[in-house]
Each structure stands twice: as structure tokens, then as C-alpha cells.
Image (cartoon, rainbow, N blue to C red):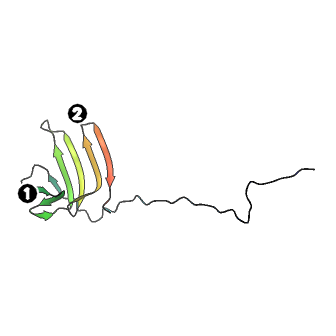
Amino acid sequence: MVAISSCTNSSTATTKLAQVKDYTIDTTGIPHDTVLVSDERVSVVNGIYLVNNQKYSGILKEFYPNGTIKTYASLYQGMLHGLYKSFTKMGILMKYDCIRIT
């Protein structure tokens, strides 16, 4: 005789589903305009990036004195939103991040 048993009572067993988070970032509202950090129109006030005293949406780039890119940041309404990359002086990717305004 063979007996089969289970560790759970089928009438009280529940299945927990994992919560799946949405990490997609909508960047459709970000224009493809690019401004350099060194541009005199760029300012940062309380962490908000402004161009001509208006919240900036677009790409912000910064370069090292040797001409290699230092940072590449996507901004929406003055805040980091979307792709952010920073590089060493030798042009090696140091940080890669996707940032979402919540």
C-alpha cells in the first residue's frame, strides 16, 4: 500500500503572487534639445535645473577640459528624469542610471 500526503491543506492553502513593479520611464515629453552645463543660461536653484530661468526639459551634457564627456543627463521639468550617465576623465562609463520622477 502506498500513501501520499501533502504538507498543506488544500482547502486553506493560498498562493502569494510576487508584486511586479513597473520600472519603465516615459521620456516622450523630453525634447531632444541639448544644453551644456557650461552654458551661461543654465542655473540650478534648489536642485531644479533652469535655462533662462525656466524649468528645463531636454538633455544636459558636461565635458572635462580634455574634451571627453563627463555627464549626460535627461531632464524633465527641471528634474533628472530618464537616462543619467557619468564618465571618468578617460571616457570610461562610471555610473549608469535610469531616474523616474515620482
Question: For the residue carrying disc 1, how many other residues have a C-alpha within 10 Å: few (<14), some (14-19), or many (20+)?
Answer: few
Q: Secondary structure at mark 2?
A: loop
Does 20 sit above or below residue 70?
below
Label of residue 58 in the image: none
Q: Nearer the viewer, residue 50 or 2?
A: 2
Does 51 sit above or below residue 97?
below
Question: Residue 71 placed where, x, y %?
Answer: 22, 45
Does 100 sit above or below residue 69?
below
Question: Residue 72 placed where, x, y %?
Answer: 23, 48
Residue 75: name its quadrant: bottom left
Residue 81: name its quadrant: bottom left
- Residue under the image location 89 percent in, 50 percent down: 2
- Residue under the image location 17 percent in, 46 percent down: 62
Label of residue 41 in the image: 1
Does 67 sit above or below residue 74?
above
Q: CA distance from mark 2 to mark 1?
A: 28 Å
Left or right: residue 6 compared with residue 36: right
Q: Nearer the viewer, residue 68 or 9?
A: 9
Residue 49: name its quadrant: bottom left
Outermost top residue: 90
Question: Residue 87 placed where, x, y %?
Answer: 25, 40
Question: The residue under label 2 is which amino acid type?
Answer: Met
Left or right: residue 70 compared with residue 102: left
Position of the C terminus by quadrant: bottom left
Question: Residue 64 placed where, x, y %?
Answer: 15, 39
Of the image marks 2 and 1, the number of the one nearer the N terminus: 1
- Residue under the image location 81 percent in, 54 percent down: 5
Q: Nearer the viewer, residue 71 or 21?
A: 21
Question: The residue under label 1 is which amino acid type?
Answer: Arg
Question: On the image, numbered disc 2 is attached to which residue?
Answer: 90
